[in-house]
Amino acid sequence: MAATGTRQSARARARAANQAVIAARRVRDEANMVSLTDYFAAADAIEAARLTMARAISDIRDREGTVTAAAALAGITLGDARKLLALLVDTNDGTGPSKDNGDAGAVESP
């Protein structure tokens, strides 16, 4: 009879250990969901900020005539300015002409 009792006790300990593992996983999953929600909210805010930056560079370029001038005024590299302007082209969805023509054909004003 002792063997049966020992087996049942071992099964009970195994079930308890498994339940503890499952409970710990549930706690980690809930904490991870909170962290992921924060992460994606921040990513959305960054994306919105980059689009705002891109529109500002585009507006400056339209007023000044070149991407080079817009980049210089914003204090960023020409490559960074072009990357920002590319965001506007990507959001254009091909429904209209792109405003990003770089510096091609532009005349620098003194």
Image (cartoon, rainbow, N blue to C red):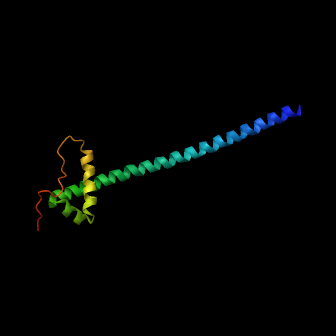
- Provide residue 86's location: percent of width, then percent of height: 26, 51
Instruction: Tell me what residue is drawn at x 73 percent, y 38 percent.
Output: 14
- Residue nearest the observer in this picture, 88 or 48: 88
Instruction: Tell me what residue is drawn at x 42 percent, y 49 percent.
Output: 41
- Residue nearest the observer in this picture, 102 or 45: 102
- Residue nearest the observer in this picture, 42 or 98: 98
Give the side of residue 4 with respect to residue 78, left or right: right
Instruction: Tell me what residue is drawn at x 60 percent, y 42 percent.
Output: 26
Quadrant of the image occupied by residue 78: bottom left
Note whether 49 is above or below 13 in the view shown.
below
- Residue nearest the observer in this picture, 17 or 58: 17
Note whether 69 is above or below 100 in the view shown.
below
- Provide residue 79's location: percent of width, then percent of height: 26, 60
Note whether 91 is above or below 54 in the view shown.
above
- Provide residue 51's location: percent of width, then percent of height: 29, 52
Residue extending furthest bottom?
A: 110
